[in-house]
Image (spheres, rainbow, N blue to C red):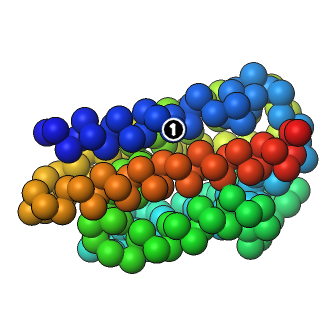
Amino acid sequence: MDFKQALDSKIADHNLLDHPFYQAWSAGELSLDTLRSYAREYGAFISTIPQGWETIDDVEIAAEETEHIDLWADFAMGLDTTVSEAQIPQVKALFKTANELFSEPATALGALYAFEAQQPATAQSKLEGLKTFYQLPKTVEPYFETHSHNEHEAEILLERIAELPSESHTTVVEACEQMSVALWNALTGIHDAECA
């Protein structure tokens, strides 16, 4: 499983739990306006996730992810805002990167892994931050509640990657790195726009 180690090392270089934005969130240091900006901007990226699963022909998970777009909309609504087209350059870049990587099976597998492998831990951290520090309607919680449980998407992706010819593994790892960097940079963009 050396490709798993290669994928995980790319993620470790840009582990989202280490990002100052998520650290500030879990410490209750983000303003509501900053959370609103995040909900609006990042929602554009969340809407791309089903496409990645469709590209690798996992209709069931793609359908679930489509439902999760509505949960994200509920998160935004609980903050008195709505998801809109990304305005922050780094979030626009994430949206573009996701669309490109999600268009081919090998790159979709790597890009999805970069996101899904981190999602249970980041969702748990954000959920705890919301519950502990922010007096918000319960509607902000279901997206993070749902994703804080490991539904084994990362394991499913690893199985699918293992089925690829070994010469495709480099492409998968490169896509994982591209997505990891794009996710990190998007948080930096929101952080710099809102917290600087």
Give how far across and how far down residue 41 sits, in percent: 74, 60
Image quadrant for the C terminus? Answer: top right
On screen, residue 70 above or below 38: below
Give how far across and how far down residue 35 sits, in percent: 80, 45
Query: Which residue: 78% across, 43% down?
Result: 191
Query: Which residue: 82% across, 54% down?
Result: 37
Mark 1 Cα within 10 Å, few/some/many (few <14, many 20+)? some
On screen, residue 57 above or below 111: below
Q: Nearer the viewer, residue 160 or 173?
A: 173
Let me know if residue 79 appears in the view: no
Image quadrant for the N terminus? Answer: top left
Horizontally, residue 97 falls left or right of residue 174, namely right
Give how far across and how far down residue 73 sits, in percent: 70, 62
Horizontally, residue 178 falls left or right of residue 128, namely left
Horizontally, residue 166 falls left or right of residue 177, namely left
Give how far across and how far down residue 170 sits, in percent: 24, 56
**SS of the residue at dot 1?**
loop
Where, by quadrant of the figure, is residue 150 drawn?
top left
Residue type, mark 1 in image: His
Horizontally, residue 63 falls left or right of residue 41, namely left
Where, by quadrant of the figure, is residue 110 drawn?
bottom left
- Figure label count: 1
Let me know if residue 174 appears in the view: yes
Q: Which residue is mark 1?
A: 14
Q: Nearer the viewer, residue 186 or 60?
A: 186
Query: Which residue: 75% across, 22% down?
Result: 27
